[in-house]
Amino acid sequence: MTMAAGNQMQVLIVGGGLSGLTAAGSLRDADIEPVVIESDETVDSESDRGVVVLWPEALTLLAELGVAVVDDDTASVVNTWTRREPDGTVTHRRESDTGGIVTLPYATLRQRLSEIVPEGAVQSGRTLQSVEVEDGFATATFANGVREQFDLVVGADGARSRTRALLGGPTLHQFGTQTWTFPLPAWQNQNEATEIWSREGIVFSALPAPEAGVGCLTLPEEKLRHRAKRQPVLTKLGDAREVLDWKLPTALDEVDETDVQAVADMQLATNVWGDRRIALVGDAAHVKHQLTGLGPTLAIEDAVALASELRHSDDTIQARVAEYISCRKARLDQLETVSSQALGDVETTVPGSYRSLLDIRNAQIEAHFPHSDHNSP
Ligand SMILES: Cc1cc2nc3c(=O)[nH]c(=O)nc-3n(C[C@H](O)[C@H](O)[C@H](O)COP(=O)(O)OP(=O)(O)OC[C@H]3O[C@@H](n4cnc5c(N)ncnc54)[C@H](O)[C@@H]3O)c2cc1C
């Protein structure tokens, strides 16, 4: 067994994704030594995660950490947001005056975050197998059988978190929808995001992104039941073509089948956040549906909050973990209870199970795109 050495607090961060790298970067220059293990062979490889959205909550934190996400053409800024009817008629147009939201490839963001992580902190190709917490330390066992002791283990290992499973946390379950993303070449170079929530529960959004825009289409599973599993994906999306005649049919005609990515619509109850010397961050602690668009932002917020607690508190590690949990639990609980007024009329057109997603979505839009223009086409 390898023993932790010196007086520095030894922190094992399991997962070199968005939350793990943010946590490690936030601990640099502190009297804390982070070790990030990542089961992928590298953290800067091209990833098939596509494009992620960052809300101002995350952009502010990243700017404080010195992570530049909009300094070149690898990111797009969205400062106008519209909601439309399925035929394209604008029902709401809102503008941001604070820079809006940013879209960029997951792989680019991961690369930028890895630049603020202390040199040598990331150990790629290493996988956590188990953790045992005893008095005074946490012992991690890796897939190769090596055991090491740490003061704290941070589970930043994503939606299918091993760390959460070791804590006896809940498993993921399907939301009852299926989402696909695909490039939208004609959406290039615009600063507008738009979305359509149809009465039938089909949701289509179009976002600007570097190189090509991104289309994101969500269908309730009941709309897909009559489709054979092996049907080509573009055929499966036929029902959406019938409901939405704005942009979508042309986009699907133009897209190459191999560029359409399926995203699992999962959710996870937020009820296990850690235990004594283990803390969960990001998707390991909570998985939000794609339609909220908040996964990356919440992952970054969690990581900064935990690092701040570790850096600035003199309490015991257990007390710092408890304080982190209390603060983040309050943030996630608050998200579950938001309800919005200004865009509320759309609620009547979507199925009941989408209501909470739409509420979260509307609250984010109202907060960050404050200028409303109901009369603009
Ligand atoms: C396939 C996919 C597509 C997505 N598409 C979008 C999208 O289009 N838009 C959007 O906004 N959000 C999207 N998301 C969600 C978004 O990527 C997450 O919310 C965000 O990345 C959460 O950050 P995280 O650090 O918690 O997890 P991640 O970024 O997933 O990082 C977790 C890391 O842990 C590593 N890991 C896992 N287990 C172990 C282990 N036992 N030992 C060591 N390392 C381990 C993984 O390899 C991974 O690198 C997508 C998620 C997935 C899975």
Image (cartoon, rainbow, N blue to C red):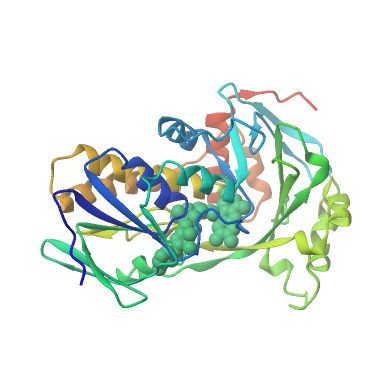
Q: Quadrant of residue 361?
A: top right
Outermost left residue: 135
Q: Residue at x 50, y 69 (%)?
A: 173
Q: Nearer the viewer, residue 167 or 73?
A: 73
Whether 43 is drawn above or below 56: the answer is below
Q: Nearer the viewer, residue 265 or 84?
A: 265
Q: Position of residue 53 (x, y in %)?
A: 58, 43
Q: Position of residue 312 (x, y in %)?
A: 21, 37
Query: Is residue 287 in view from this perspective?
Result: no
Q: Nearer the viewer, residue 45 or 355?
A: 45
Q: Residue at x 88, y 54 (%)?
A: 254
Q: How many marks?
A: 0
Q: In which quadrant is the N terminus drawn?
A: bottom left
Q: Position of residue 288 (x, y in %)?
A: 50, 54
Q: Quadrant of residue 377?
A: top right
Whether 164 is drawn above or below 27: the answer is below
Q: Residue at x 58, y 51 (%)?
A: 107
Q: Residue at x 53, y 50 (%)?
A: 356
Outermost front residue: 120
Q: Is residue 337 left or right of residue 348?
A: left
Q: Position of residue 130 (x, y in %)?
A: 30, 73
Whether 248 is drawn above or below 60: the answer is below
Q: Is residue 312 left or right of residue 192?
A: left
Q: Nearer the viewer, residue 197 or 238?
A: 238
Query: Is residue 284 in view from this perspective?
Result: yes
Whether 345 is drawn above or below 42: the answer is above
Q: Is residue 292 left or right of residue 276?
A: right
